[in-house]
Image (cartoon, rainbow, N blue to C red):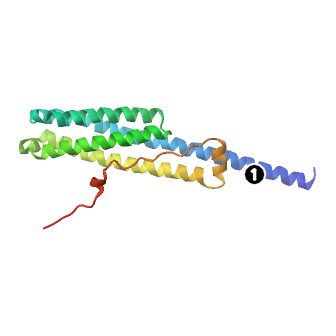
Amino acid sequence: MSTTQIILLALGAVLLFWVVGAYNRMVRMRNEIGNAFAQIDVQLKRRHDLIPNLVEVARKYLEHERETMERVTAARAQVMAATDMVKSHPNQNGPIKSLGLAEGVLAGAMGRFQAVVESYPELKADQQMADLREELIHTENKVSFSRQLFNDVTLDYNNAIHQFPTNLLAGLFSFQTAEMLQSTQSEAERAPVKVSF
């Protein structure tokens, strides 16, 4: 065996090890996206379990606010359906977008619900309602942290499949760009708060 053949064989072995390592890294990163969504799912399930309890406690005080409570219930069902779709297809972009839209609808409905609760002092003073609202606030914070983790993992994956030379491998093995979870706030909600005295 000549020196040239040995060098070519060594280069081929190095290239093969690099391809295997890069492929396995991209697969691991893609799977981390599914795991990160599972963490979001845990918090969303917790939130979805709290919402009916909030509505039920409020129902006895807010009989004439039925439409608000129905919107919250419908929005919750829509988010749960979108969450199930993402769970079954965590690496597809369509379900992630649908979840983001459904989350926006739920956030709006919950905002209206909170405004209604604020306008009823007897409901605001109800200890069970206060406990449920506090639990919901903690859960919302956990959802935010889980979303951030999901987006960080997704960014790492997207960077890996778009950077040279792994982008060549990603194209060869059909690794697709993953969708990040977008903010569910409207432009009006993102606008700076104006404080005047």
The residue closer to the viewer here, 80 or 34, is 80
- For image coordinates 9% across by 36% down, the residue present is 61
Asked which secondary structure carries label 1, the reply is helix
Residue drawn 74% across the image and 47% down it: 16
- Percent coordinates x, y for residue 103 in the rendering: 33, 42
Residue visible at 26% across and 44% down in the picture: 108
Counting from the top left corner in percent of width and height, residue 10 is at 81, 52
Q: Is residue 196 left or right of residue 97?
A: left
**Callout 1 amino acid:** Val
Q: Is residue 158 left or right of residue 109?
A: right
Report the residue that reaches farthest toward the left: 122
Looking at the image, residue 170 lies above or below residue 63: below
Nearer the observer, 24 or 165? 165
Q: Is residue 98 above or below residue 166?
A: above
Q: What residue is shown at x 61% (from left), y 55% (from top)?
A: 163
The answer to which of 192 and 47 lies nearer the viewer is 192
State the image coordinates of residue 6 (x, y, percent, origin top left).
Answer: 87, 52
Above or below, 54 relative to 145: above
- The extreme front residue here reads 187
The outermost residue toward the bottom is: 197
Q: Is residue 139 left or right of residue 154?
A: left
Relative placement, left or right, of 12 versus 126 is: right
Find disc 1 in the rendering and name its residue.
14
Residue 127 image offset from top left, x and y in percent: 12, 41
